[in-house]
Image (cartoon, rainbow, N blue to C red):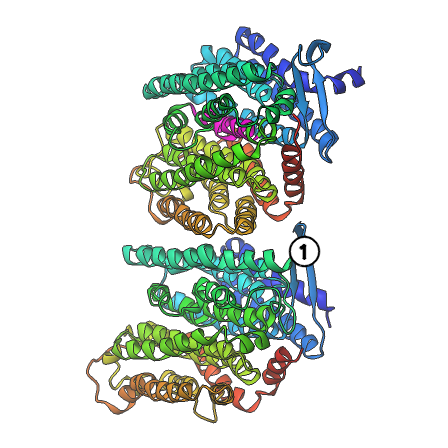
Amino acid sequence: MMSLQTAMLVGLLAPLVVALLTPFLAVRHVWRDAAGPIGGVITFIAALEVAMAVLDGQTPRLFVAQIAEGLAIEFAVTPLGAIFGLVASGLWILAALYTVGYMRGNHEKYQTRFAAFYAVAVHAAMAVAWSGNLLVLFIFYEILTFSTYPLVTHKESAVARNAGRLYMSILVGTSVVLLLPAVVWVWFSTGTLDFRPGGYLAGQIDPAMAPILLGLFAFGVGKAALMPIHRWLPAAMVAPTPVSALLHAVAVVKAGVFTILTVVVYVFGIDFLAETGAADWLVWLAAFTILASSMVAITKDDIKARLAYSTISQLSYIILGAAIASSIAVQGATLHIVMHAAGKITLFFCAGAIYVQAHLTKISELDGQGREMPWVFAAFFIGALSIIGIPPLGGSWSKFMLMVGAVEAGYLLILGVLGLSSLLNIYYLLEPVSRGFFRPKVKTVEVTSHPLVVIPPVLTAILSLLLFFYVDFFAALAKLMVIS
Amino acid sequence: MGAAIITNLPALLVVVPLLLAPVSALLPSAHLAWMLTLIGAGSSFIAALMLQSITETGVRISYHLGNWEPPWGIEFVVDSATSLTLVVMTGLGFLATLAARRLVASEINDKDSGKFYAAWMLVSGGLFGLVLTADAFNLFVFLEISALSSVILIGMGAGTDRRALVAGYHYLVIGAVGATFYVIGVGFIYAMTGTLNMGDMAARIPEAGGNAVLYVGFGFMVAGMLVKAAIFPVHIWLPAAYSYAPSAVSTLLAAIATKAALYVLARILFTIFGGVPEIVDIAVTNVIVPLAIGGIFVGTIMAIYEADIKKMFAHSSVAQIGYIALGLGLATPAGISAGFIHIGNHALIKGGIFMAIGGFVAALGARASLDNITGIGRRMPLTATAFLICGLSLAGLPLTAGFISKLYLVRAILETESYLILALVLISSALSVVYLWKIMEVMWMQPAPVRSPKLVENPAIYLPLWIVAFGNIWFGIDASWLVAAARFASTALLGGGA
């Protein structure tokens, strides 16, 4: 096997190499389209190698450059980073396959540009996952924003341009105005930006200021889509569905909650937060976001818009777990990164598959279409069940742990919020499926078959199922996060 | 011989361009004049690098012109702050000269080229002198040399746009007011201290205590430099001057002219008046910092509403000068280093941006505005990509030089616990993405106008441009040199003595 350093280099560079080669491979569409999945497999193998080492108790490190005194571009994989790296690279393989089917089936323009920026975004997500300090995290967080902009505005229409503006202004605006000063604040008051097990802010900053600093992080990380800075995510749905699936359900939004979890666990330290109660306000704001965005989701008839609001709600589960700041809640939040990723990418894959094959975008038009596209609707069903948190699907683990964590930390009301949210989830996520299978057809459409957009959601649905039985690997990594 | 050159480096930096200028005016061909200027600019850069290597760790060189001892003779002083400023100015001056050949050929009449390059070298020599001199009156002389020759350069834009004449005239008048203010201030201080040598002034000023003459003299000197550095609200000459000047001139002036004035401002505040911090404090907290923030917002907002590309970035320069002035105005070691870091980085950013705009103008054969650069990203990919890199650096995207500036400025502000200033700076920085993004959208997201001619990219423009763009990335990844040099510069400035 590769040495650990090589594995890290490969994991970080393979997506970038794919991006750089794409314009040259474009002479043959087959070559260009093969580059993504192959790059995905290579990246995933590297990520697996790195994750194994982390599970072994090592911290894989890769030093790149010294920017200035006390500021280094360095990668160091935490257990949390290992998990996020695995999720991003693993799902990229399927998303890359799906992209080929979607873009071809839809006859999209500028497929080369699309493929190149897609790979750059994956590269940025991997670099975020493996970042060794807050500076590197911030750098690639920004690159992730900029690299996804051409994907959001891919259609080059007025709607796409406006969505792109909203996307940039919220994500860049919050990161510059709030996140950057938060990072510099940590740097200035502790002299370091490293991540350390157990955190290191205790005794370094005034506990009275801790909620403010945490607020700068929570709102500065616009990608976590905490209300009221969530508006960019529904707007970004104008992008082709492969973008919504991998980036706006997995890589980009998970980079957001990953940042919050990392800051809570490795910078603040959960003990420090629990003792000072500095994250108490965030528990309630996250709970509000969970319920409010579920309510909005119910009102949406557009499939992707509904999924976007569902994502906002589910992201706040992770923020909630970080804010409760107990060992079990943080582990639950971490597992939810994995479980929600597998479930939500399935739903987006299905939404895109329905669009490519039948050109339907509204839930009210889905009546009776289940029999036309049984595989797609079945996959949707499984993905939805996992997100709702019903055994035997992966999502049940993370929701269960979050509930236990809430009770343990004395947030009994939160238990009610989580229960109510699950009920809402059942309503709005299962509605498309029940319409598809149990209602008479309202619209006759011609369904063209494109296997490349059907196989990936079926595989990710199976993955959601497997994650219930083989959760140990991720659970062990998550446990390492809170043992210092 | 070699040793003689090294000891006389400070003088040569000024004398060589001033002597080459009349030669260039007499040369028969534009190409020869350019070659001569390039050689001059290149040797200045080498000289500045040599001075930097001598002074980088805090060594201070004092050079007596004509071997006349100060205070009778004129003294040149090179310390870490001087040499850093000089390296930035000469480096960008050299690259601007490199790009100038093509830019000048497309905008300036061939028979005027010799004179153009003569004025070019006069500006450079004058500005280098401004930075080097330790004599307050001699500084005024260099101020006039560089100002008058800048007016000529700006006015030469009249060949393509008559508005250049008005812009040049405004600069002449407003610049003269600034220079006069400065020299009046020097008069007061001279009357009080009996010396024009900055070091002697610095030593004698604290003895005068709370003398009213001191306040008046200080006020005039600072006010004069605010005009020259184009700090809000006395920046009004700058947007027109930069946008109607020939492209090559915008590149040169944006990269080096206001930087020299900012450097002199720092010298006045922290070296000459370093012994009376109570006076300096009044000026920085009540005047310079508020004006800097005013400039940051006015410049940024004007840039957002501007359609003419060159003017947009001229407004943006007002904002960026505000950031530098803000760093200096914090009057802490961290603040002054942040100011110096941005002096270097902003020269790199704006030098590149104006070079790229020059490339667009040369290819389009018309002023670049939001209407006619649609889709230019695909029509001139090399120029446009380099422009994009410099633009992202301007917006402070990580891994570019602009980010380093922002990082250190934010840290310096946090250190002084001025949270309102911090909030304003961050908001303005987010706003600066707006105008940048407006251009990017037009350049890449919109189709080219129908029946548009094929645009030709010229290597004589895009090669130097790419060097600058590469510099923006390089100094974003390895900033140790600049950060360390800026720290020594702030130590040298705050250390007292000229």
Along the line of sight, the residue nearer the viewer: B236 or A256? B236
The residue segment tinted magenta is B246-266
Residue at mark 1: A64
Name the residue at 50% across, 44% down. B393
Three-letter residue code for mark 1: Val
| Quarter that holds the N terminus of chain A | bottom right
Q: Main secondary structure of the magenta part?
A: helix
Residue A18, position as x, y percentages in the image:
56, 60
Residue B150 vs A38, above or below: the answer is: above
Report the residue that reaches farthest toward the bottom: A392
Q: Is residue B248 magenta?
A: yes
Image quarter for residue A166?
bottom left
Q: Give the number of callouts.
A: 1
Residue B285, position as x, y percentages in the image:
47, 39
Residue B454 vs A144, above or below: the answer is: above
Residue A318, position as x, y percentages in the image:
47, 77
Q: Secondary structure at mark 1?
A: strand
Q: Is residue A428 left or right of residue B39?
A: left
